Image (tube, rainbow, N blue to C red):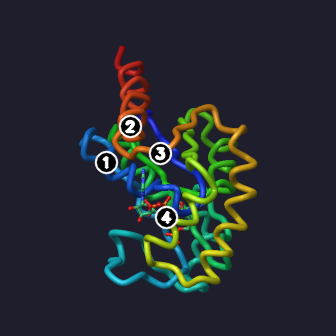
Amino acid sequence: MARVFVITGPSGVGKGTLIRGLLARIPELELSVSATTREPRPGEVDGVDYHFLSEDEFDRKVKAGAFVEHAAYSGRRYGTLRSELERRTAAGIPVVLEIEVQGARQVRQSLPSAVQVFIVPPSEQALRERLVGRGTDAPEEIERRLEVAERELAAQGEFPHKVMNDRQEEAVGQLERLVRAELDGEAG
Ligand code: ADP
Ligand code: 5GP
């Protein structure tokens, strides 16, 4: 089966940024588009950034077993759709999941062959600055995300691979080497 890569770590650490860099360097990789009940941010497109669902739609999909994993995060729900993952792995396409820690734990149980990478911020102050600098979240939402981040950072020891996102180019390079090593290992 094609490889699955889980990229996790606190909000604002740079997961999305690093994944964009990674996909540019390894074009065969594809990102699974998650479902969420949160509101789209300005510029986000349904079906591209997320599948934006109502609470009812999300619930129905949970009951129908449509999710590989799903979790509540900061009062909203997020999940990986089985269809997003399986149509790629069935076609031999390696997939990246960008998910929070509770979801990563579920994938560890259900798909132990997935390669799990935790992205570490250089400091908690840097994490705060990135969340503020991104300009997408209200101050209360940033505080909520930083509270969750403390618990997430405490769980980093659970993850076999860690990449520190200090200098962006270096972090993308580390991710690229890790992913290529896994993909080459499979071919050989
Ligand atoms: P996440 O997907 O983990 O929530 P983002 O990729 O949205 O995080 O990054 C959060 C903010 O931090 C963005 O504004 C991004 O441009 C910035 N950022 C990402 N990586 C770095 C880095 N290495 N150094 C400084 N800023 C960064
Ligand atoms: P955001 O609201 O910033 O887009 O995402 C909030 C958090 O939810 C981030 O940590 C992000 O990685 C995570 N997330 C995004 N999609 C999924 C998903 O499908 N499952 C889980 N468990 N978390 C997700």
Q: Is mark 3 within 8 Å of ligand 1?
A: yes
- Label at residue 21: 1
Is residue 51 visible in the rendered structure shown here? yes
| x then y, percent, for residue 72 | 68, 70
- Label at residue 170: 2
Q: Residue at x 36, y 48 (%)?
A: 88
- Label at residue 168: none
The answer to whether marks 2 and 3 mark residues whose Cβ atoms lie closer than 8 Å is yes
For this rendering, which residue is in front, 123 or 89? 123
Q: Residue at x 32, y 77 (%)?
A: 45
- What crowding class fits label 1: few (fewer than 14 Cα within 10 Å), some (14-19), or many (20 or more)? some
In the displayed structure image, the side of residue 176 where residue 8 appears, left or right: right
Residue hosting label 4? 130
For this rendering, which residue is in front, 85 or 19? 19
The answer to whether marks 2 and 1 mark residues whose Cβ atoms lie closer than 8 Å is no
> First in sequence: mark 3 or mark 4?
4
> First in sequence: mark 4 or mark 1?
1
Q: Amino acid at mark 4?
A: Arg
In the displayed structure image, the side of residue 171 where residue 152 appears, left or right: right
The answer to whether marks 3 and 4 mark residues whose Cβ atoms lie closer than 8 Å is no
SS for tag 1? helix
Q: Is mark 4 within 8 Å of ligand 1?
A: yes
- What crowding class fits label 3: few (fewer than 14 Cα within 10 Å), some (14-19), or many (20 or more)? some
SS for tag 2? helix
SS for tag 3? loop
Which quarter of the image is occupied by the C terminus? top left
- Label at residue 166: 3
Q: Amino acid at mark 1?
A: Gly
